[in-house]
Image (tube, rainbow, N blue to C red):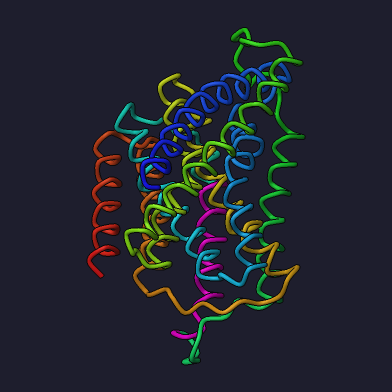
Amino acid sequence: MIVLQILILVMGFIILVKGADLFVDAASSLAQNFHISKMLIALTIVSFGTSAPEFAVSIKSIISGNTDILLGNVIGSNILNILLILGVSSCIHSLTVKNSTVKKELPITILITTLFIVLISDKWLTNTKTNLLTRSDGITILLFFSIFIYYLFTIMRNKTSSTIDDEKPKYGIAKSMSFTVVGIVCLILGSNAVVDSASSIAKILGVSERVISLTIIALGTSLPELVTSVVATKKKEYDIAIGNVVGSNIFNIGIVIGLPIALFGGIASVGFTYIDLLALFIATLMLFIFCFRDYKISRKEGITFLIMFLIYYLFLFIK
């Protein structure tokens, strides 16, 4: 049984890597063919595409009543996106961050992350017995997410050709679109295979649902972002590497959590601690500080992210 799950795990990783390689090239070509910035493509098509596994897990979890998996998936994924994905990517090469990302996109990320943490902290802020996310909380999250959507439409409308590079696209328009879809499908299939096999192995070994959701499922659903950002960094597509993470974190809270709760009703959370939410907030704040300081994420800062990631996960497993 375990041997079969390990084989599925390996095959899932292979599909992920190949899909990410195709996805990055296709997304870059798409931006060049339509004369729009790669950051805009990263914040929309790339980030929304790589967040598809989180959304699938979210819908499945809320319907089946596994709310801790729903919340752990998003909290864990957003922590992983910053500490692990940008940590690994910046260790490969320092990531240059654009002025608009520091002044607009990252503040939006901090805003919606802080909103989520406040809304889910009823137990600690109002001394109630449980932390609740009500339907009104879901609608509030969606309203804040609409600020991000409005921002995307604004930069899409105001983007001028002078801001776009003259590099010849690798693929034509038709191939760019087709390969983008194929890349997303490969990322989703590969991540699903990895999540299912890893979860089965963990359950066989007796790991708790909270730890599985914050680690294996969060890591598995973040694999599209991880592989995409690493591949993008190796190809020196830094806008895609960073925009993928920033967009995914906003999308995870706005749609992966906000939409199901607004549609299906509120949920209660009993399996999370101050440490989980504090880790999410500190990771988001550190990302902003590093980028604001010198408009890049250096190798040294990437190592700092990785150390923070190891400390957090060590705490999870020890606890």
In the image shown, does 8 or 297 lie closer to the viewer? 8
Closer to the camera in the image, 94 or 28: 28
Is residue 217 found left or right of 45 in the rendered image?
A: left
Q: Which residue does the image show at 62% across and 25% down from the upper left?
A: 27
Left or right relative to 99: residue 84: left
**Percent position (x, y) of residue 104?**
57, 47
Asked if the magenta segment contains residue 317, the reply would be: no
Q: Residue farthest to the front? A: 1
Q: Report the residue at 54% width, 44% height from top.
A: 192
Query: In which quadrant will I find the C terminus?
Result: bottom left
Q: How many marks?
A: 0
Q: Is residue 142 above or below residue 25?
A: below
Range of magenta residues: 104-124
From the top left corner, tell me how far across and down residue 119 is, in percent.
56, 75
Image x and y of residue 224, in percent: 51, 38
Pick the front one: 151 or 282: 282
Taking the spot 69% from the left edge, 37% from the top edge, the residue there is 155
Residue drawn at point x = 50 percent, y = 91 percent: 128
Q: Quadrant of residue 138?
A: bottom right
Q: Is residue 307 left or right of residue 24?
A: left
Which residue is outermost to the top? 168
Q: x, y (%) of residue 22?
A: 57, 21
Q: Is residue 64 above or below residue 155?
A: below
Q: Is residue 111 magenta?
A: yes
Q: Please name the predominant secondary structure of the magenta segment in the image.
A: helix
Q: Is residue 163 left or right of residue 96?
A: right
- Asked where in the image residue 260 lies, by quadrant, the reply is bottom right
The relative height of residue 137 versus residue 259 in the rendered view (above or below) is below
